[in-house]
Amino acid sequence: MLLTIGIETPTNENEAYGIAVPVLFTDKYACISAADTLEEIPTQATDAIHSILEMMFEDGTDITALQDKGYKHYQSLENFNYCDTWLLLDVDISPYQGKRQRINISLPEYLIKRIDSRVASNPIYKDRSHFLAIASQKELHL
């Protein structure tokens, strides 16, 4: 899932970069973190996201209902006016979407070959099932 990340640039060398993930701000949760360098931002943000998602999942929050509204929306909110830079981070949220269930489907051979070729050539897909899950989410606008 692509998540909008707000960054607050430090004003001096004794401060860290502030990180906020607006879609994960609720009445109960706030996804924030910090990074000492620009290079650490993706790792620190990903760790914070997984921590919050794990808590939300354990509390029974429907993770599939999360809808990132994009930086233009979040930039206009007073809560995030301190963020001076925005980026998108692709985070695998599938571990928090519930138990995986095995199904039996039939597909034309040419389609299976094309799926397998795409999975083999693109490292974002773990396997055929992961590809089909991502494709289904896109088709269903989730």
Image (tube, helix red, strand yellow):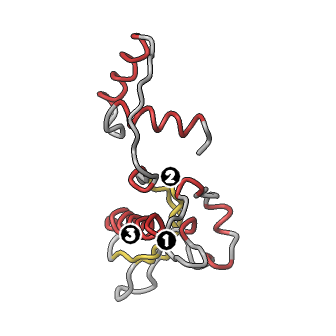
Q: Nearer the viewer, mark 2 or mark 3?
A: 3
Q: Furthest-top residue in view?
A: 109
Where 42 sits versus 35, above or below? above
Q: Is residue 38 left or right of residue 97?
A: left
Q: Residue at x 55, y 59 (%)?
A: 62
- Residue 58 position by quadrant: bottom left
Q: Nearer the viewer, mark 1 or mark 2?
A: 2
Q: CA distance from mark 2 to mark 3?
A: 17 Å
Residue linked to disc 1: 7
Could you say whether the residue bearing mark 1 is in a helix, strand or loop?
strand
Q: Residues within 10 Å of mark 3 (few under 14, many from 20)?
A: few
Name the foreground residue: 47 vs 9.
Answer: 47
Q: Picture coordinates of residue 102 (x, y %)?
A: 38, 35
Q: Is residue 81 left or right of residue 115?
A: right
Q: Residues within 10 Å of mark 2 (few under 14, many from 20)?
A: some
* Res. 136 mark: none
Type of amino acid under label 3: Ser
Q: Residues within 10 Å of mark 1 (few under 14, many from 20)?
A: many
Q: Residue at x 50, y 52 (%)?
A: 2
Q: Are marks 1 and 3 in contact (CB under 8 Å)?
A: no
* Quadrant in the picture for the C terminus: top right
Could you say whether the residue bearing mark 3 is in a helix, strand or loop?
helix
Q: Furthest-bottom residue in view?
A: 14
Residue linked to disc 2: 2
Q: Picture coordinates of residue 38 (x, y %)?
A: 36, 68
